[in-house]
Image (spheres, coloured by chain):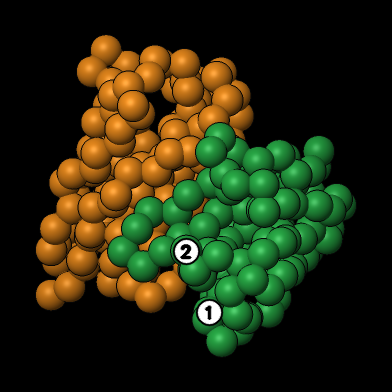
Chain colours: A orange, B green
Amino acid sequence: EVQLVESGGGLVQPGRSLRLSCAASGFTFDDYAMHWVRQAPGKGLEWVSGISWNSGSIGYADSVKGRFTISRDNAKNSLYLQMNSLRAEDTALYYCAKDIYRFGGWGPFDPWGQGTLVTVSS
Amino acid sequence: EIVLTQSPGTLSLSPGERATLSCRASQSVSSSYLAWYQQKPGQAPRLLIYGASSRATGIPDRFSGSGSGTDFTLTISRLEPEDFAVYYCQQYGSSPVTFGQGTKLEIK
């Protein structure tokens, strides 16, 4: 069974940093692109960032470009999101999601983890 | 960036009825790289349809997708009680990946 488990969320002050992790199991992690998607409280879905299976292709939403960095460690079956210069508008539930195609591009996503909550507030 | 606009915002129907949800793109979605997701309260989104019309694994055949170019539709042929949820469309043909704002399907 494919499992994605996010961790690292919490309460952080504006301007500070946080690193999210996603532990993957149940599939050959280094064959698939991976993504971070966020959902602000009561709002819709926003793609944050994606990384190809070999880290050769990386993309970011304009809202986080220059502040967030996605990475992966295929030896550890793990995906990461380094979030710097956090703002109140980054407050959201952050989901880790797997691409459905082996060695594919961006999406679609299945499955998704249960998310980790990031709250940016003073 | 491709903007996806979903309509209606809220759809009120009864179990057994047919639901038709729309997703319109601001520009053509290449190769019909359009997906639909279902999200229930407190749960992560679940992939229903990809490639505009292909059902994901384990999705009942009452769910179907259609469309191309800029106009796409998700149809639920006969609503079951568990189908009442929020539905999102997503385009993944060009970067950045974008989602529609969602359609809430509620029990009438």
Label 1 vs label 2: CA separation? 11 Å
Report the side of B82 relative to A83 (left or right).
Answer: right
Q: Quadrant of residue A89?
A: bottom left
Query: Foreground: B33 or B18?
Result: B18
Report the side of B86 relative to B19 (left or right).
Answer: left
Point out the image quarter for the N terminus of chain B: bottom right
- Disc 1 packing (10 Å; few <14; some 14–19; many ≥20): some
Determine the secondary structure under disc 1: strand
Point out the image quarter for the C terminus of chain B: bottom right
Q: What residue lies at 55% left-to-right and 65% top-to-bottom?
A: B80
Q: Amino acid at mark 1?
A: Glu
Query: Foreground: A55 or B71?
Result: B71
Q: What residue lies at 32% left-to-right and 16% top-to-bottom?
A: A74
Residue pointed to by mark 2: B82
Residue pointed to by mark 1: B106
Q: Which mark is residue B53?
A: none
Please state the chain letter of the residue tagged with numbered disc 2 in the rendered image. B
